[in-house]
Image (cartoon, rainbow, N blue to C red):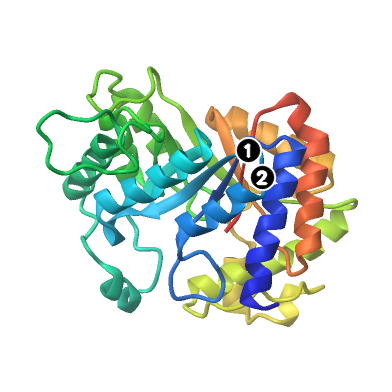
Amino acid sequence: MSRAEALQQSRFLAQDADGLGYSRFWVAEHHGTDTFMSSATSLLLGHIAEHTTSIRLGSGGVMLPNHAPLMVAEYYGTLATMYGDRFDLGLGRAPGTDPMTAAALSRGNGDLDTFANDVTDLAGYLGPHRQGSRVRAIPGEGTDVPIWMLGSSTGGAQVAAALGLPFAFASHFAPDQLDQAIALYRSRFDAQAPTAQISQPHVMAGINVLAAPTTAQAQFLFTTAQLMAVRIRTGQPGLLDEPVKDLAAVLPDQLLPLAQGQASVRAVGTPDEVVEHLDGFVAAHDVDELVVTTYTHDPMMRRRSYELLADAWLPAAATGAQAS
């Protein structure tokens, strides 16, 4: 599949999600890798906005150390000015790439204090006009694009709580501190912070999903995501691999645990099996929304998975959709 085709398939998935009743479609910022075709996040969201009608679109997220807050406010303020109140601005501290590319991109270091100050500045640029301010985001000013704090550890939870923002935890690839981060966020949430956008804590968590007509087929298709995880964790990112019947036949013994781990953030099987796991995950961690991520070698199988999930679960539960 070419890069242009990959971007086209993301648009097709967003259109499906829009029609199926998903609440959100988020795009993550990644750089310098063939695995994810989403370095220019705001451009992708603008393209998707042109081809969808009502689903909320967002960054999952913008890696703020790579950008000046003013420019982010201008980009997302422009989107909101063109397409209305359909955008969520998720912010993260990680660079979204390897160290060398991060050095080429880097504007900041992602330290908590610096990051919190940048988020505060960004929120200010998107808020009402401030009398006497010489620096303004135009477009952006007055759009009040909702800001979400992202994180894969307790650091993001601390910032989200202190600033009174909704919090999205990347448990789909880093589940270890999920409960600790949620507990910290809820206990320290400050609804009176000048940047507060919500009156009480609101938590979203990520989970890997693959629904298929049979359990065996879902497990077979999911091997693509397992091989992707091994590639990323061993520093060999690349295009998605075709699914395999036996992971042990293509991976050395020492890498099998990487492919088979993190079962707690995996819902793979028939639609009913997936729904049962998702319901259990929501109950176990007391989350308000889910971000579901699905990777398949054949993009039609990814689209089918989202359709099967929507038919089985969306009538009874609100969920968000993310694709990168």
Q: State the image quarter where residue 32 is shown.
A: bottom left
Horizontal arrangement in the rendering, residue 72 relative to residue 108 (left or right)? right
Dot 2 surroundings within 10 Å: few (below 14), some, or many (20 or more)?
some
- Position of residue 135 measured from the top left corner of the image (x, y, whole percent): 16, 44
- Position of residue 256 measured from the top left corner of the image (x, y, whole percent): 63, 72
Identify the amino acid type marked 2.
Thr
Say which quadrant the C terminus sits in: bottom right
Horizontal arrangement in the rendering, residue 283 relative to residue 201 (left or right)? right
**Residue 211 shows up from this direction:** no
Judge by depth and name the residue closer to the eye, 324 or 129: 129
Say which quadrant the N terminus sits in: bottom right
Please report the residue visible at 61 percent of the width from the left and 70 percent of the height from the top: 228
Identify the amino acid type marked 1.
Ile
* Vertical arrangement, residue 259 with respect to residue 67, above or below: below
Pointer 1: what residue? 55
Please report the residue visible at 21 percent of the width from the left and 60 percent of the height from the top: 109
Mark 1 element type: loop
Judge by depth and name the residue closer to the eye, 156 or 285: 156
- Position of residue 24 measured from the top left corner of the image (x, y, whole percent): 59, 39
Q: State the image quarter where residue 9 is shown.
A: bottom right
* Vertical arrangement, residue 127 with respect to residue 73, above or below: above
